[in-house]
Image: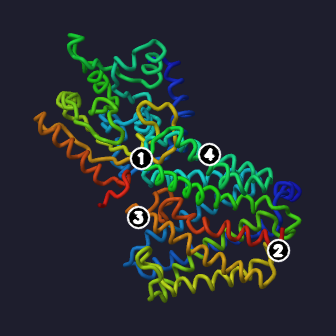
Amino acid sequence: MMGFLDHFLDHLQPNAVWALVIIFVLLVIATLISYALKLKNSSRDYSELLSRIHSWWVMATLFAVVFLLSRSTALVFFAFISFLALKEYLSLIPTRRADHRVLFWVYAAIPFQYYWASMEWFGMFIIFIPVYLFLFMPMRMVIIGEVDGFLRAAGTLHWGVMITVFSLSHIAYLLVLPVEGNPIGGGAGLVIFLVVLTQLNDVSQYVWGKLLGRRKVIEKVSPNKTWEGFIGGVLTTTLLATLAAPWLTPLNLYESILAGLIIGMGGFIGDVIISAVKRDLKVKDSGNLLPGHGGILDRVDSLTYTAPLFFHYLYYLHY
Amino acid sequence: MSMFANILRYLFFGLVVRPVVMIVLGLNVRNRYRLVKNGPAIVIANHNSHLDTMVLMTLLPFRLLHKIHPVAAADYFLRNRVLAWFALSIIGIIPLQRSVKASHSDPLAGATAALDRGDILILFPEGSRGEPEKMSELKNGVSHLAKRHPDVPVIPIYLHGLGKALPKGEALLVPFFCDVFVGETLFWKGNRQRYIETLTSRFEELDAECCHSDEWDNDE
């Protein structure tokens, strides 16, 4: 039995498996706290919190299962998240009827981008979207020949691919980084470190904001964001980063402090940028795929900043 | 419908239509509880794309598939033998003669018979797909049916986004989330004009509920 399990989990370092276990321990604690709150203040409505935590269970289970299955399954999973995020973005923004076939190529870029990651072709991975796709898309648009709104269409499409495909695909490249660079956690350890810290950063900024929040940071974009929440969140994330880094990453203490700051601040910026998009389009949520959270973009907004920033920081230092 | 065609129909919807609608497109359904759980019923919707029928048939329970029949234009869907076989046996359409003068028989006989059997009809009261994402005037066919079957519930559904995913005249499907707004059930009002007015205002309400970001600067 143990032999089978060892073989089954061959592609994961033991610490990565333990990290997945810890995610579920955290979820159990969060679930118990939310039910305790509900029992204590029976007059208040906790249905939003409960459905949010229910969605966390679904997401964490999917995340853990794809990691346990195989590296390819995890890569397909992240490609699918890019697909959902891009689809949500394109469904939200106004698009021109003339660009129908351009949109097809935009979607077609996703499998290519994740394929370069899976074959560990770093050079192609890093230039495919900003060079080849970004030069191809305007050309395809010009062949169609609709000039009305050309600049606006080109700009919104380029930016959408940038955040939903290029940025997020850095998670995939973290996963395929050579295990020699990170013998204790492997690629999976790095992804778990990034994704869990980014999500906990969102949660802790929210909690600190609720507890102490007074001074608004950028009221016009996101009225609920406060300096207290932001700073409390960044400090919490930095502390967690220094605790988790020795178990999952090759970062030393000083490097992990900076990694925590990058994830804490990057996560905040990614979050408010998607808020600005929603505000511009006059919608509250980007979708309703995840009950209690909104759409997929509402969930991966912070990752669109933290994934590339953390990746290049780590890549510069250790690979 | 033959047993063989029925099996093909379930396979086609289970293995092709449903995965495409749920994964490639993706539905945001508002007020799903207003959908019918059984026939007879008439589901009516605005019409922008061939995908509309596929989405409506995916929304209704899979086990009822054999009872679901889109009412569709005979001149368009029966124009050649292959298409006619596909439309009649796989999609399960009830063909409708659009020009009443062409046939002296009752154009709604097929639809009436299906409702009497307890089936669910899908109808596009605008008649054709029209301008992408714009509603045109409602035709009278639905009020004739409702008058004949005053006890059959009519469920209005507003679809948004499918005109972008597969517009009229395009063969290439591009993924977009589709918003589905299920309206309140409606019964015959005893008067055709009042009925059409109620239906029209029901669709206008659903349209207003829907997010509108199809144009830049729509707030100015």
Mark 2 and mark 3: span between their CA atoms? Answer: 41 Å
Answer whether labels 2 and 4 touch (C-beta < 8 Å). Answer: no
Kindly identify the residue that appears in the image at 33 percent across and 44 percent down: B158
**What chain does badge 3 belong to?**
A
**What chain does badge 1 belong to?**
A
Q: Which callout, 2 or 1, points at the residue further toward the start of the chain?
A: 1
Q: Amino acid at mark 3?
A: Asp
Kindly identify the residue that appears in the image at 57 percent across and 86 percent down: A232
Would you name the residue on which mark 4 appears?
A136
Instruction: In the rendered structure, find residue A250 and report the number of the disc placed on it.
Output: 2
Q: Which callout, 3 or 4, points at the residue further toward the start of the chain?
A: 4
Mark 2 and mark 4: span between their CA atoms? Answer: 38 Å
**What chain does badge 4 belong to?**
A
The mark lying in front, picked from 2 and 1, is 1
Residue A8 lies left or right of residue A233; in this view the side is: right
Around disc 2, counting alpha carbons within 10 Å, would you say few (fewer than 14), some (14 to 19), or many (20 or more)? many
Q: Amino acid at mark 2?
A: Pro
- Where is the C terminus of chain A found, in terms of image quarters? bottom right
Q: Which callout, 3 or 1, points at the residue further toward the start of the chain?
A: 1
Q: Amino acid at mark 1?
A: Asp
Q: Secondary structure at mark 2?
A: loop
Give how far across and how far down residue A239 sits, in percent: 68, 84
**What chain does badge 2 belong to?**
A
Mark 2 and mark 1: span between their CA atoms? Answer: 51 Å
Would you name the residue on which mark 1 appears?
A148
Q: Which callout, 2 or 4, points at the residue further toward the start of the chain?
A: 4
